[in-house]
């Protein structure tokens, strides 16, 4: 086999290409064994690791305090394992809804996977009142010393007699308050212990559990789910679903609608929908690619090879991703459609060149050689530019984006390598086509018309592109940004629907601003919350805030408790009990009705010999509903707690967000301020900045690479301007169709640049290929048109995905690919023809007869 003589680098490239061609042509069994071994190893890694992560917060940049706070809140607080049940009835059925909820929650509390339930406010139940009595000593000891001494004064014999006599004189059958005081707080200690809860910044006693009309009622559940991974969450929600269906089927009276939401529900349903989206996008991508390939080339065997190689590339990239990353975000796995759309380009170009060589009578090995020689460089450039475009995402400070960029870069790189190594074994029995190739005829006529007179098409396309560019830069049509992380969650999954119903029925305001305090010790913990309480109470009284809810009432101070215990040790509880018993008997009270008084005195007496702080974990029974109050404010990690601030109205600007942040940080500079609505105003400028930064960095890198490759200003200018106009056209379309830019579809912009390079680089390959220039260009435009359609399809199949993150990415990328095709066929082709015509008119060469050696020398001038 003889090849044109070369020198320098060309000789080295030719030798490498020859080695590759011989291995591909004569070592088929070895390559098959290698492919099977790689696939088996990849499947083994994926099966063993399965380290998937459905956390949408991992898509957000960790450089913001608010984002870090959201992640810490979700991971450290028991609310993450909380499920919210909603019961919705029709008009006229509030009592029926209440009856069903009561029965439902009673049965639910018996389930082995339920730790505790909450469907009544604790202070409204006798059980809750009895349980709160157990922490009265701790609350008393945590009072300021002067208030504690005042409380102890209530245990003086005279004060006890006076109070019990007053209760006897005022108690009547109609005085519910006096009856409660007599049984709940006959000594006045309970009221003083609960005093911190009465401040404007105290902890919530419990939010409303029913709508105003009573038709929607809610209940909370904490499960014993050990982990919040997708598989555990799916298993938990399966048990919830089975229980709910059983309750509805067994209930014979009116049946309300039952809704379930919560973090477990979201993780289970998002991961399940992502698995479905992944399978659907993969099947549709492969199906569309297969159909287009068969229409273009009328062959089955190469089609099977393309599908298998794309699957192998995806498996290897996914396996490496699982090894590289501790947990792989399921959103990043949506890269398969991107890989199918970009990776199939390599196969189409290789097969198109192979067919062109076969039509000239070249053998299989010769056709392999020219295909690798002519298309290999283009594949290398495309892999390089695409990898650059996506690896830049690693500097986004978003682990989800970094993972997606890495997976796409790995996938495209392996697709390029595997297509060159493995695809040709499926070409051995492929005979040169004998039927009429209508696509090739069309591209040939298009090329001929462009070389005859390119200026009309160039003028029209340039006018359209300039109009699009003007719309893109015009300020009167804004580009919409939707950076709310909630927008990345599926809207149609049951958990999202339940959350929306709950918000509508309960008329909830925007979510509060959350304050996280992580203290080194308990004294610091108490002091920081007390300072926050004082400052935020002042702001609330001044009208700066609507409400404040802090855990200051349960923030224990070791110094206070130690000092108050010294005061407590001076009390003689044996004498106090005698006085209480005598006073009760004297006033005609039944001693059995006041057992709680003597239990309280026993607890206070026991505190006289105690040291250190009370242990909150032992103060309430495991199934106590008071734990919902504790869990709302206190994390599983010691020293970490949350408070909540409700602004007067939802935050509408970054200045309002900054004002609330400064108010909190002035009281506690080390507090972490977060919350969904608060975080949103950190993400908006970040998303806008990242859009410009990513596109600029990728654009500069790609343009630099293109200059190194082209080394001729005219061709470089055509390609660079095509990329710029494609990007501006994309922005114009987003503006005109009111498509919002979210946190994920910003990825479209570096991707569109990479695809634009993919298509444009083919003109360089054609200009350096031996043979008829117009014939070569027509033979490249045929697979290029199929490439464009397959890439467009690869993104378009993401549009119907349930996950709006992938759906939005697919829509924006599909629009971007459309503009790349438009600029390639109707701007770059006529511009390329126009430049060539000028060279011919200048007496430089004949576009139909130049060989690759002469062509290369001429185009390098």
Image (cartoon, rainbow, N blue to C red):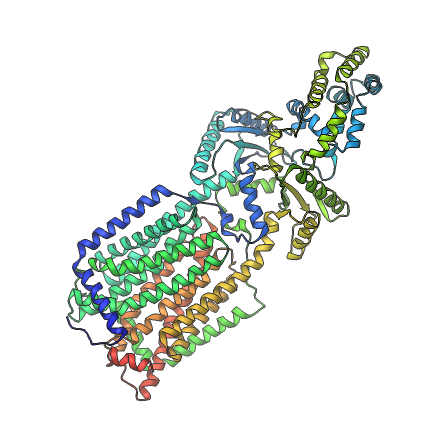
Where is 502 relative to 586, above or below?
Answer: below
* Residue 828 placement, left or right of 430: right
Q: Quadrant of the C terminus?
A: bottom left
* Residue 677 placement, left or right of 756: right
Q: Quadrant of the N terminus?
A: bottom left
* Residue 544 placement, left or right of 368: right
Residue 845 horizontal/vertical position (percent): 28, 85
Residue 615 horizontal/vertical position (percent): 62, 29
* Foreground pick, 674 / 299: 674
Residue 275 horizontal/vertical position (percent): 40, 45
Res 376 → quadrant = bottom left
Residue 695 horizontal/vertical position (percent): 48, 65
* Residue 528 placement, left or right of 455: right
Residue 44 visible, this angle: yes
Where is 769 relative to 794, above or below?
Answer: below
* Foreground pick, 144 / 688: 144
Res 25 → quadrant = bottom left
Where is 679 relative to 575, above or below?
Answer: below
Identify the residue at horizontal 31%, vertical 70% (top origin). 781
* Foreground pick, 593 / 44: 44
Res 569 → quadrant = top right
């Amino acid at each position: 086999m003889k090849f044109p003589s070369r020198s320098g680098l060309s000789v080295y490239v030719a030798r490498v290409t020859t080695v590759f061609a011989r291995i591909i042509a004569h070592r088929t069994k070895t390559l098959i064994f290698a492919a099977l071994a790689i696939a088996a190893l990849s499947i083994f890694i994926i099966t063993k690791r399965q380290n998937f992560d459905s956390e949408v917060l991992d898509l957000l940049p960790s450089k913001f305090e608010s984002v870090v706070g959201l992640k810490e809140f979700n991971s450290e607080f028991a609310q993450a394992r909380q499920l919210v049940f909603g019961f919705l009835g029709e008009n006229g059925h509030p009592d029926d809804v209440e009856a069903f909820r009561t029965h439902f929650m009673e049965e639910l509390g018996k389930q082995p996977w339920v730790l505790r339930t909450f469907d009544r406010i604790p202070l409204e139940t006798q059980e809750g009142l009895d349980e709160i009595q157990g922490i009265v000593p701790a609350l008393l000891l945590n009072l300021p010393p002067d208030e504690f001494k005042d409380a102890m004064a209530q245990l003086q014999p005279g004060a006890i007699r006076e109070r019990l006599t007053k209760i006897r004189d005022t108690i009547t059958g109609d005085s519910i308050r006096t009856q409660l005081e007599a049984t709940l707080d006959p000594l006045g200690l309970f009221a003083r212990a609960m005093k911190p809860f009465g401040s404007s910044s105290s902890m919530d006693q419990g939010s409303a559990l029913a709508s105003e009309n009573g038709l929607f009622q809610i209940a909370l559940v904490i499960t014993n789910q050990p982990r919040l991974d997708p598989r555990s969450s799916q298993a938990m929600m399966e048990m919830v679903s089975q229980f709910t269906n059983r309750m509805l089927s067994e209930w014979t009276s009116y049946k309300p609608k039952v809704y379930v939401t919560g973090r477990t529900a979201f993780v289970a349903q998002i991961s399940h929908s992502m698995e479905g989206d992944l399978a659907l996008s993969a099947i549709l991508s492969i199906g569309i690619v297969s159909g287009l390939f068969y229409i273009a080339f009328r062959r089955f065997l190469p089609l099977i090879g393309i599908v298998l190689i794309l699957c192998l590339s995806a498996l290897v990239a996914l396996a490496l991703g699982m090894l590289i990353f501790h947990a792989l975000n399921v959103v990043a796995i949506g890269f398969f459609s991107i890989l199918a759309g970009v990776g199939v380009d390599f196969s189409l170009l290789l097969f198109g060149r192979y067919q062109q060589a076969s039509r000239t009578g070249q053998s299989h090995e010769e056709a392999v050689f020219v295909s690798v020689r002519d298309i290999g460089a283009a594949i290398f450039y495309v892999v390089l530019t695409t990898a650059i475009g996506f690896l830049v995402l690693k500097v986004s400070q978003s682990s989800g984006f970094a993972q997606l960029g890495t997976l796409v870069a790995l996938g495209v790189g392996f697709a390029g390598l595997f297509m060159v190594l493995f695809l040709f074994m499926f070409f051995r029995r492929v005979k040169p086509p004998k039927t009429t190739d209508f696509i090739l005829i069309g591209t040939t006529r298009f090329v001929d018309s462009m070389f005859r007179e390119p200026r009309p098409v160039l003028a029209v396309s340039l006018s359209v592109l300039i109009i699009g560019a003007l719309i893109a830069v015009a300020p009167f049509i804004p580009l919409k940004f939707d950076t709310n992380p909630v927008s990345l969650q599926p809207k149609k999954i049951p958990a999202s629907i339940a959350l929306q119903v709950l918000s509508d029925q309960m008329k909830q305001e925007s979510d509060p601003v959350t304050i996280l305090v992580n203290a080194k010790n308990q004294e610091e913990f108490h002091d920081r919350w007390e300072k926050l309480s004082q400052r935020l109470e002042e702001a609330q009284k001044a009208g700066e805030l609507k409400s404040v809810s802090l855990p200051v009432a349960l923030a224990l101070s070791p110094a206070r408790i130690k000092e108050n215990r010294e005061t407590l040790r001076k009390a003689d509880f044996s004498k106090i009990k005698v006085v209480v018993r005598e006073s009760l008997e004297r006033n005609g009270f039944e001693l059995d009705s006041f057992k709680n008084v003597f239990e309280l005195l026993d607890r206070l007496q026991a505190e006289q010999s105690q040291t250190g702080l009370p242990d909150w974990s032992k103060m309430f029974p495991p199934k106590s509903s008071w734990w919902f109050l504790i869990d709302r404010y206190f994390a599983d990690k010691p020293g970490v707690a949350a408070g909540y601030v409700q602004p007067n109205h939802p935050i509408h600007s970054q200045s309002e967000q900054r004002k609330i942040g400064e108010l909190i940080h002035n009281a506690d500079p080390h507090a972490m301020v977060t919350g969904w609505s608060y975080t949103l105003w950190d993400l908006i400028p970040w998303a806008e900045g990242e859009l410009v930064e990513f596109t600029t960095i990728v654009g500069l890198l790609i343009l630099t690479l293109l200059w190194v490759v082209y080394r001729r200003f005219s061709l470089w200018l055509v390609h660079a301007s095509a990329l710029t106009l494609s990007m501006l056209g994309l922005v114009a379309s987003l503006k005109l169709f009111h498509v919002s830019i979210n946190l994920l579809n910003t990825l479209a912009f570096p991707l569109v640049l990479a695809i634009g390079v993919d298509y444009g680089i083919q003109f360089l390959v054609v200009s350096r290929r031996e043979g008829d220039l117009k014939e070569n260009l027509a033979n490249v435009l045929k697979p290029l048109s199929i490439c464009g359609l397959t890439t467009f399809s690869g993104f378009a199949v993401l549009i119907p995905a349930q996950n709006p993150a992938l759906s939005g990415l697919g829509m924006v990328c599909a629009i971007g690919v459309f503009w790349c095709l438009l600029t390639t066929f109707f701007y770059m082709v006529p511009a390329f023809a126009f430049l060539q015509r000028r060279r011919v008119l200048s007496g430089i060469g004949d576009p139909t007869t130049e060989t690759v050696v002469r062509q290369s020398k001429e185009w390098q001038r």
